[in-house]
Structure formats: C-alpha cells, structure tokens
Amino acid sequence: MKNGKNIIEVFELKRKFKELIAVDGISLDVAGGEIFGFLGPNGAGKTTTIQMLCTLLRPTSGTARLNGYDIIKDKDNVRKSIGIVFQDPSIDVKLTAWENLEFHRLIYDVPRAHAIKRMNEVVEMVGLSDRIKDMVETYSGGMRRRLEIARGLIHHPKILFLDEPTIGLDPQTRNHIWSYIHRLKSSEEITIFMTTHYMDEAENCDRIAIIDAGKIIALDTPDNLKKKIGGDIVSINTQNNAASKLVLEQEFGFRVLEQNSTLTFEVKDGDKFLPKLFKETSLGISSVTVRRPTLEDVFLALTGRTIREEGPSTRLRFRMH
C-alpha cells in the first residue's frame, strides 16, 4: 500500500558521457509502497538513472533523495536504504545459494543472529527453500533471478531496484517472477522501482514514467496513459496501402501510421466506425482488427515508433489529449 509520503525525490538529474547526454534533466517523485515503472527502449537512459540513484554513478548535475538521504552527500545511508537486482547476473554460480546470501550479509554487516532468520524468510518468499544448499550453477535462469531478489532483501531495504528483472526469461517464468514481486509488495513495507521495456510488465506498476532519449515524456498510471490515446486502435491491411493511406488521411482526416505492411489509426468508437470503413470500397481491405489502446500505442503516439525500434524520436503520429 502507498503511504502518501515520497521516498524517492529526483531533481533535474542529468548525466553526460562526453558529448552524449544519457539522462537529460529528469525530475520525479515516488511514493512509499509504490511499484514505480521506468518504461523505455534500450538506450533511453533507464539503467543510467538507476545507477545514479543507487550511487554507482555520479550525476553530471542535479541530485536526488532516497529515504531522505542525498545521493551525493550521504551515499552510505542511501546504500543502506536500498536493495538492487542488476540487469546482468551478479551472483556467484560456483557458490551455493546460501553462500551467496551469506556473502551479501557480510557486505551489509547484518548480524548473523538476525540474518539467519531473515535469510530463511526471503528464500521461502521466492520459493527456493528446497534448493538453498544447491550450487547456483544448477539453477535455471528464473531461479537465479529469484535468488537475486532474495539477496537484495536481506538487509530490509526501504527501496528495491529491479533493472529489467525478467529480461531473457520465457513468458511463464516472467509471470512467476511477477507473482513473487506482488507477494513481496504485500508482505514487506517496501517501494519497488523497476525498469522494463516489456509493455505487459509495465501494466503491473502503480505508475509509469515513459523515458525516451534521456527525457521523461509522460508519467501517470497505466490506465490514465492509455486514456490519453482517446479512442480505439484500428489496424487494416489493404491491396494498395499507399492509396488507402491517402484516402484515410484526406477523406476521413486520420493520422495513419504504416508499419509492417499494416495501416494503423485511432478512432473513437471503432466498432461503430467499421461499417463506414467497409463502405469505402476503394480501400480494398483484406483484414481489419479493432482493439483498445495499449501502452505500446502510448509510446508510439509519443515517439512515432514502437519501443522495440532504435533511433531518435520522430514527430507525434497519433493525437494525444
């Protein structure tokens, strides 16, 4: 449950690497107990932001406060307040799961008498109790990710950072990881700040900041972001896309995007519009689908491309209200 008090406060955070601006003056707040999502394509600045918030990378300018501590002036207390699950694996596969947890306990100087109970708690939470004495090299990718989450919780952090927590995992394992994350939120007083480029994962967040080219271009709940599209999404395949695109733009007034031989546009009450569309015989429609907007559509509307595409943003294609 969100407690209403901001546990993360970011002020004009910026990071440059020579001439490249990776993070371009972002500001945001995250409430205690929130699952906050950072959504954007590879290279958008998500990981660089997390590295700065976790004191692993010094900002070029700006700052942030985590749990009341400044990331520049009070690094030690920031680090005591956070747990991190990095995008790249960071556990020692030549140790047992328990040995990995014990090593983390020593780094954070958690008293052993307290840590044993805590280590058993977090292992049970992620469903690894029966494999805790096994070598990590015998674990599947999903099990290793769950162990990393457990490791990040040993010292009772106020904030858990998850950088692409399910990248490279199959859909079923991704769903299992998310069930553990939701269980974690309900059982611990903790805030979760996660990055992802999976649209379906972002739906799990209380709020989402969409980042592109180092800038936050939208921040709201998933539902409110999708409502900004303002209508249904119609996708059609035609016998002549160039001519059909012209008709849809000039006669119907739509902004039409063509991707993978499919024409896509936004319209209010798509099911009621379909009869008008079918009457336009010059389009030569071979297939049509109508659906409610997704976060993929939101990103497309804001940047002119899908989140899986690389390269700089272009002009808006759909109208955002």
Image (spheres, rainbow, N blue to C red):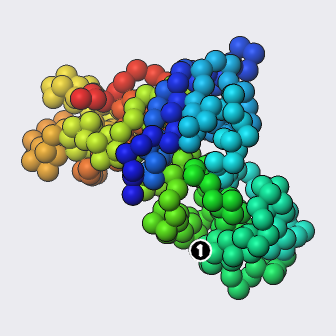
- Residue nearest the observer in this picture, 222 or 188: 188
Establish if 179 lies above or below 10.
below
Q: How crowded is mark 1: few (under 14 residues within 10 Å), some or many (20 or more)?
A: some
Looking at the rendered structure, the kind of residue marked 1 is Met
**In the image as oriented, which residue stretches furthest toward the right?**
94
Residue 315 in the image, given as x and y percentages of width and height = 40, 20
* Residue 123 seen in this snapshot: no
Q: Quadrant of the C terminus?
A: top left
Q: Name the residue under label 1.
A: 125
- Residue nearest the observer in this picture, 256 or 165: 165
Residue 171 in the image, given as x and y percentages of width and height = 54, 65
SS at mark 1? helix
The residue located at (15%, 29%) in the rendering is 252
Q: In which quarter of the image is the N terminus?
A: bottom left
Residue 155 in the image, given as x and y percentages of width and height = 69, 59
The residue located at (69%, 63%) in the rendering is 154
